[in-house]
Every structure is written in structure tokens, then in C-alpha cells.
Amino acid sequence: MHPNPDTEAAEQMTTGIAATQRRVAEARTHGPLVWQRTGTVGTELVLRDGVAPGVVTGSIVVGGRQPYTSRWHADLDGNWRVRALTVTTEGSGWRRNLALSRTADGAWTCGVEESGTVDAPRAGIDDPSRLDRGAVLLLTDSPIFQTWALRALRLSPGEAAATTPAIRVRMPWLTVVAGESAFHRVSDNKLRVSGDGPAVSYDLDAEGIVTYQPGRLRIAH
């Protein structure tokens, strides 16, 4: 019996798709991560080794009405909590630097630098003592920080939502806001976060890495 060409072609296509998916999964596990913005022109590249503790770096380019570039360095402890974060953002005629870190006793310190003139909120926070010592740290529109929070809280699929103190660094102005966030791992591949505006849903892969946020971003690698 001669093989059916259509069947062979379908099998080859299925095999090729599976191989591509494996390569993408392997790249996510060991290599850099890239997200595309879907609400505006922009990308974020995160370099990582997939383990904690360690230092992870990210680079961001965003277009739209307020284009800017950014680079950040996050120092993680062994429980996937950010213990230090430095961020630089820069646009046309302005530049800002932020340094957040936890001291040995858990208290947060905050330092800022600003140059240029821009009509925007000030960087940092006026009183770092208002930042909770056990808070998770989130960088606006940087999805890897959601993944770290999920891991730090040790959320399991189907469990009740966990409410935790949160520190939000709002981009691009680097304003630091203290508050609370509720994290709910609805299923293996779905995370719901609320507490700073409307609730937001994220798609996750098997590692808990954010792969998609409707209207905002999607993973490209």
C-alpha cells in the first residue's frame, strides 16, 4: 500500500509544529524572554537564568504618545521576592532614575534622580516607611514581575485569591505607590490580579510565565 501524500504532509506539519513548540518552551526555560505590546508599539526583553536568587535585567522600548526607553535590574532573593530594583527611563528631553532596596531588617529605601523638564508626577515616594516590608514589587506592564509574585506567594491553581501588600512602580515616571493586590490563580494557565484599578487577567504557560494580557501584551519568545 502506497502512503497517502496528504497524510504524510499532515504528519510532517504536526511534527514541525510540535518541534517548534518544544524549542519555544526550551527557550523560555533557559533563555531570554521577549514580549510585544499590543496596545501600542513596544517590546520588552528580559534576560534571565530561571533561578533565584539572582539578578535579572530588562530593556523596554515603547512608542505611542509618550515614547520612552527603559532599563531595569532586579535582584531576587531565594523566595522570588525582589529585594532591590533599579530603573532608568528616558524620553525626549527628560531622564529619570529610581533605586529601591530592602535593608537587612526589611525596611525599604528609595532614591531618585530627575533631569529635564516634563509635566508628570514626581519619581519615587515621599516617605519610604509607608512601604510594607513584606510587599511584592510590581513594575507596570512588565509581566515577569507578575510571575515572580505568583511564585513568591506559592499560588496553586484553584485556590482562593491571596491578598498581599504591594509596591507598584508606575512607568514611565517611576512613581512608587504602596497598596494591596489580590492574586488568584484561577487555573493552571490563568492568573487574575486586582487591587490597582480594574482586575486584570493573564494567560500563563507551564512555568507560570505570563504569555498574554488582552489588549496589552503577548509573549513573542
Image (cartoon, rainbow, N blue to C red):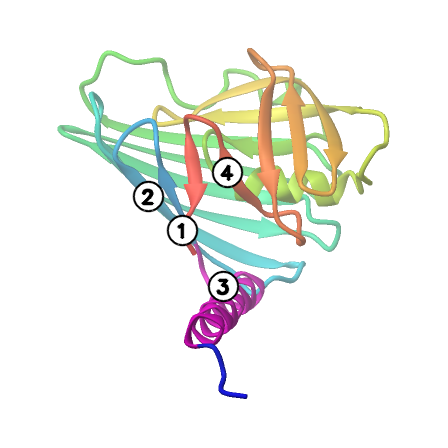
Which residue position is annotated with label 4?
212
Q: Amino acid at mark 1?
A: Ala
- Residues rendered magenta in the picture: 5-33
Where's residue 159, x and y in %? Answer: 86, 31
Mark number for residue 43? Answer: 2
Name which residue lies at 70% across and 30% down: 135
Task: Label 4, secondary structure: give it.
Answer: strand
Q: Please, what is the three-letter code of the amino acid marked with disc 3? A: Val
Say which quarter of the image contains residue 124.
Answer: top left
* CA distance for labels 4 and 2: 13 Å
Q: Which of the two discs, 4 and 2, sits closer to the camera?
A: 4
Q: Amino acid at mark 4?
A: Tyr
What is the CA distance from the residue labelled 2 to the residue labelled 1? 9 Å
Give the mark, 1 or 4, whose residue is nearer the N terminus.
4
Residue 138 visible in image: yes
Dots 2 and 1: beta carbons under 8 Å? yes
Residue on which disc 3 sits:
24
The three-letter code of the residue at mark 2 reads Thr
